[in-house]
Amino acid sequence: MKNKSALPLIFLTVFIDLLGFGILIPILPAFAVKQLGVDEAAIGIAIAVYSFVQFIFNPILGKLSDKHGRKPIIVVCLFINALGYIIFAFTTSYLILIASRVVAGIGGSSISVAQAYIADVTTKETRSKGMGLIGSAFGLGFVFGPLIGGFLSKFGYMETGLGAAAFSLLAFLVTLILLPESNVNRTEIVETKRKILNIDAIVKAFKNPNLAILISLFFILTFSFANIYGTFALLGIEVYGFSDLQNGYMFGIVGLSSAMVQGGLIGPITKFLGKKKILIIGSALIMITLALIPYAGNFLWLAVVGIFLSLGTGMLQPTLLSLISEVASDAEQGITLGVNQSLSALARMLGPLWGGFAFEFLGYPLPFLTGSAFMLLIVIATIFYIPKRINFQ
C-alpha cells in the first residue's frame, strides 16, 4: 500500500535539515577565506571531503535501510549532521574545518534513504513528483537557509554554525516523533561482510544496461553542477564584489526558482512535455546558463541566469531520479538509489576539486565553462542515444 500521507512529513524532515545545509553553503567559502586565510583550491578540498564521505556511506546506509527500515537511519543521520555543524561553530583551524565536514558528510548521507522512502510511498506514476519533493526541499533550503546564514553572519560565524545545528536537531525531533516507517514489508537480506566501498552494489546496478546509462547521466550532471560548488560564492565575493548577505540573496533566488519547479511545476511539465523532451530541454538549459554565469556582469543578470539554471536542474534531476527508480526493482530501491547517490557524491567530490583548482590557477570562468562542456555531452546523449535504450512512458 502506498502511503501518500507520509510525503508531507518526509518533505518537512528533509526541508528542516537542509535549512542548516543552506545556511552554511554560501558562508563556508567566505569563512575559509576571511577567518582561516586559505586559498580557493583548499576550499575546493574542504567541500570535496564532505562529498567523499557521502560517496563511502551512501550505499552502506541505503542497504541498511533496506534491512532495518528507513526511519532509524534517517534519525541517526540527522543527529550526526547537527554534531558536524556544532564542530564548525567552534572551528579555529583548517584541520577542524575538515573534521566538521567529515562528520556532516556522514550525517548528510541519508538523502538516498529519503529518496528510497519516497519510492516506498509512491507509485511509478507519481514517483517523478515525489522525487521532486527532495529537490523542492533542497530548493527551499537554499531559499531560506542562505538568507538566515547571511543574517546570522552579522553576529559571527559561530552563531551561524550553531543556527545550522539547531535546524538539524529540530529535524531530528520531528522525524523521531512524527515520521512513520515506510519500508514495512522488509525481506531478510543475507548478511555480507561490510566494505568501506560497496563495489558489489555498484557492479550489480551496472549489470542492468538501462540503470548504467541513467546513473552515468546523473553522475555527469552532478559533476557539471559541482564545478560551481564554492566557486559560485567565491565568484560573488572576488569578481562581483558581493557581501555575505548578497551572496545569500543570490542563493535564495536560485533556490526559490528550483523549489517552484521541483515542488509544484514538475508534474504538469512532465505531463505536457514528457520525460524525453524534459531530458533534452533541461540539459540544454543547464549547458547554456553555466557558460553564462561568469559573464553575467552584475547582480541582476546573474540572478536571471540563475533562475534559468534552476529551471533546467529542476526539470532534469527529478526526472532522472524517477527513471532510475522505475528501472530498479521494488526490493532494491534503497541499494540502487544508494549507489546512485554514492556516485553522485563522488561527482560532488571531483567537481569542487577541479573547480577550486581551476578558479585559482586557470581563471575564474573555467569551473563554469567545464560544467557547460560536460552538459553538452548529456545534450548529445539525450538526443541521439538515450531514446534508443530507455522506454519512456
Image (spheres, rainbow, N blue to C red):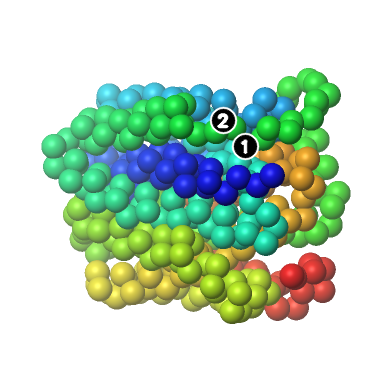
Q: Give me the residue at 51% from left, 51% from top.
A: 134
How packed is label 2: few (under 14 Cα within 10 Å), some, or many (20 or more)?
many
**Disc number placed over residue 182 in the picture, else none:** 1
Q: Nearer the viewer, mark 1 or mark 2?
A: 1
Q: Could you tell me how far apart the alpha carbons at marks 1 and 2 are, in whole angstroms?
A: 8 Å
Picture quadrant where residue 27 is located: top left
Residue 264 visible (yes or no)? yes
**Disc number placed over residue 71 in the picture, else none:** 2
How packed is label 1: few (under 14 Cα within 10 Å), some, or many (20 or more)?
many
Q: Give me the residue at 27% from left, 30% from top.
A: 162
Q: Most extreme residue toward the left, as rendered?
A: 155
- Label 2 element class: helix
Which part of the image, by quadrant, shows the C terminus? bottom right
Q: Give me the residue at 46% from left, 32% from top.
A: 178
Residue 42 visible (yes or no)? no
* Among numbered discs 1 and 2, the one appearing first in the sequence: 2
Q: Tell me where residue 341 appears, x and y as whole percent.
A: 62, 45
Asked if disc 1 and disc 2 are in contact, CB closer than 8 Å, the reply is yes
- Above/below status of 110 relative to 132: above
Picture quadrant where residue 256 is located: bottom left
Q: How many marks?
A: 2
**Disc number placed over residue 140 in the picture, else none:** none
Q: Give me the residue at 37% from left, 58% from top.
A: 255
> Between residues 231 and 201, which one lies in front from this camera angle?
201
> Between residues 27 and 83, which one lies in front from this camera angle?
83
Looking at the rendered structure, the kind of residue marked 2 is Lys
Q: Tell me where residue 16 appears, x and y as whole percent.
A: 38, 41
